[in-house]
Each structure stands twice: as structure tokens, then as C-alpha cells.
Image (cartoon, helix red, strand yellow):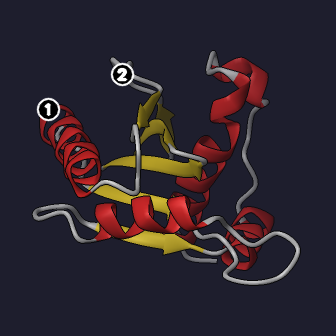
Amino acid sequence: MLVCGVELSGNDAVICLLSENEGIYYLPECRVRRIQCANPDRAEDLKYFQKTFAKLVEDYKIDHVVIKERMKKGKFAGGANGFKLEAALQLAPGLEVSLLSATEQKANLKHCPIPFSFADTGLKKFQETAFNVAFAYFAGKHEW
């Protein structure tokens, strides 16, 4: 199963591809590390962002997209642009998308911790959150 972990940050969707088969994790190469939406206030730009992301999912045959859920209110609340990008991905035809809250992510990683250092992955530092959400998604699929 191939999963695309996503962290929405500003006008960007930072991504990390992760696959798992019988407890073996693999980080496939990907042509992009982030997909940008030039101006989330314009419908055309949101549609282009959605179409670009859907094309990536199609090209890499991604089974599931998991987005790190952001808080709706409070000190660490997400911005309006991020929520627009989140909605664009959730409503994209043909995409299987779910949100993973920080609480769920923490619980999943507690029961099934990452068995290696992030530095060993070869990913860029800014992709760490996207990687963690993808791994936590797989961790939540395993029986505890």
C-alpha cells in the first residue's frame, strides 16, 4: 500500500510517499516534495492545485492520502489558506483522503514507534511532519 503523507503549510502541500508491506517500509522517489497553490483566493488556482495533486496520485498510483489535521481554533490554529487547500484535496474526485489529528498521531506512534531515525530516511527536514503523519497512518492500521 502506498500512502502520501501531507502537511499543509501556508500555500504549500508538503508531501512524503511511504509504502509498507508486511512491516517493511519503503520511501519511493517522487518528482516533487511540495505542491504550491499560487493564490488560494482564486478558484482557478485552487482547481490547478487540485488537478496537479490528483495527477501526482494517479502517476504514482497512491492508494491513500493522509493529511495532518490542523486545529480550527486556539494558539496553534491553522490559517484560512490551509483549510482551503485541505478542502480542495478532500473534494478531489478519485482521491481517498483522510485527516489524522495530532492526538491520533501521537497515540499511534506511541504504540508503534518509528524504528529508525528520520535522518536515515534521506528526506529533507521540512518533510519530517509529512513523513510522521504517513507513518502514523500505517501505525494506526496495525493491531495493538
Task: Name which residue lies at 70% across and 61% down.
Answer: 112
Q: Quadrant of residue 123?
A: top right
Q: Is residue 126 above or below residue 45?
A: above
83 horizontally vs 107: left or right = left
x and y, in percent, of residue 106 in the image: 77, 69
Q: Nearer the viewer, residue 58 or 19?
A: 58
Q: Is residue 65 visible?
A: yes
Label 1 element class: helix
Q: Nearer the viewer, residue 33 or 104?
A: 33
Task: Name which residue lies at 50% across and 68% down.
Answer: 83
Q: Earlier in the sequence, mark 2 or mark 1?
A: 2
Q: Is residue 21 visible?
A: no
Kindly check if marks 2 and 1 are in contact, taking CB atoms under 8 A apart as contact. Answer: no
Query: Amino acid under label 2?
Result: Cys
Q: Is residue 90 above or below residue 114?
A: below
Q: Quadrant of residue 20?
A: top left
Q: Residue furthest front?
A: 42
User: Which residue is label 1 attached to?
Assistant: 59
Q: Quadrant of the C terminus?
A: bottom right
Q: Residues within 10 Å of mark 1 (few under 14, many from 20)?
A: few
x and y, in percent, of residue 104 in the image: 67, 77
Q: How many marks?
A: 2
110 horizontally vs 128: left or right = right
Q: CA distance from mark 2 to mark 1?
A: 10 Å
Q: Nearer the viewer, residue 105 or 21?
A: 105
x and y, in percent, of residue 94 in the image: 11, 62
Task: Name which residue lies at 75% across and 78% down.
Answer: 103
x and y, in percent, of residue 100 in the image: 56, 71
Query: Amino acid under label 1?
Result: Asp
User: Which residue is label 2 attached to?
Assistant: 30
34 horizontally vs 89: left or right = right
